Amino acid sequence: MKLMNSFEAIKRYYSNKKNGKPLYVSIEITQNCNADCGFCGYRRSNNDGMRILETKSSYLDELLGLNPVAVGFVGGEPLIRKDLENLVKEAKTEANIPYVQITTNGSFLTIPRYNSLSEAGLDRLNISLDFLGKDHDNARGLNGLYSKIITFLDECRNHDGARIGLSTIVMKENFSEIPSIIQFAKEYGLQVTLMPYSPVRVNSNLYSVSIEDFIPGILTKLKKENPSTIMNSKIILENGEEFLRTGRYGKCDAGNSFLWILPNGKLRACIDHKESECRTLDLIRKFKEHNSCNRCYLACRSMSETVSSSKFSDLIKIGIELSRSFTCHT
């Protein structure tokens, strides 16, 4: 299966580069969320509780048309969807997506749910973790969340299934705690993906790392010390450090190497740019031609752009790292 995924990924990479289709697609399957994160536009307190939005029960047509190398199911909180297993299975078996992942706050995670998602074909489960201890509960507005994540990770030690990883937003409040989070991940045998906080979604620099707190070279130093624990490549971390230092990075490739599918099936080049929403890939490309935004360096952008612009020799190394990152957890 691992070899087949790698072969299919390589085939799609060259096909999509030639035909102008995305390598990575994020599917926002719900905008509902039970958490109350200040750095997210979908925070619970902004939504007056849970919202009922138009959603689709299938995204197969969109996936077959876009033919991506990898798909990520996100929210809101994706585990709110009771049919998530069906969506994962559809992506993995009917659309034949090489790599399928989910990013969750972890509040609804149980071993039975993890098992059913793994059996449906899930390759990777990303759990958001920005702090260790009670601070994480406070940041996410969910009492007992950190303890629940710990319990889940402890129970998973004896279960095979989708590879489990951590997803950490690098921001002012937790910048000094990043080494401890990496050590935590190492102790559990997990990888961690580091993403600089993006001010675009909530239009605020409140959580941005200040120039006084920023330590040049810290992320690449941590990568050198923990090469197999930090999922980001060295070049992605170097670019991420530039973003943390300046609040800007390069020209965004949204709508080309990556894009989003909304709950209702519409396409959006970037989730934070409503003006990029449309029905066809041709219209998405028109947005890209005029897009000058450079105010984020989130994982959907960083990985896609790096892979898309890599030399062949670098692609082999990236492919090996990706394959390891999506190999099942045992």
Image: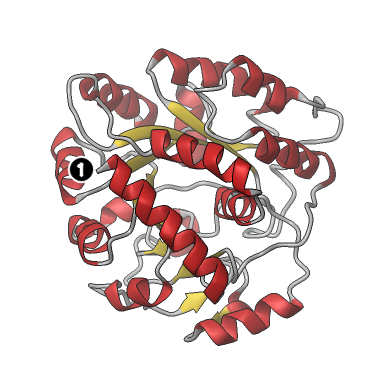
Residue 269 location (% of width, % of height): 57, 72
Say above or below: 241 vs 55: above
Side of 181 where 123 appears, left or right: left
Rendered image coloring scheme: secondary structure
Residue 21 location (% of width, % of height): 51, 72
> Element under label 1?
helix
Tell me if I can see residue 102 in this picture. no
- Classify the position of the C terminus by image quarter: top left
Side of 147 where 1 appears, left or right: left
Q: Amino acid at mark 1?
A: Ser
Say above or below: 14 vs 269: above
- Classify the position of the N terminus by image quarter: top left
> Which residue: 80% across, 41% down?
242
Residue 78 location (% of width, % of height): 33, 55
Q: Who is closer to the viewer here, 220 or 201? A: 220
Tell me if I can see residue 320 in this picture. yes
The crowding category of the residue bearing disc 1, from other C-alpha atoms within 10 Å (few below 14, some 14 to 19, many at least 20), is many
Side of 188 where 239 appears, left or right: right
> Which residue: 61% across, 35% down?
233
How many numbered marks, from 0 up?
1
- Image quadrant of residue 200? bottom right
Say above or below: 212 vs 200: above
Residue 168 location (% of width, % of height): 53, 35
> Which residue: 30% across, 72% down?
59
Q: Who is closer to the viewer here, 238 or 13? A: 13
Kindly identify which residue carries mark 1.
Answer: 118
> Which residue: 28% across, 66% down?
95
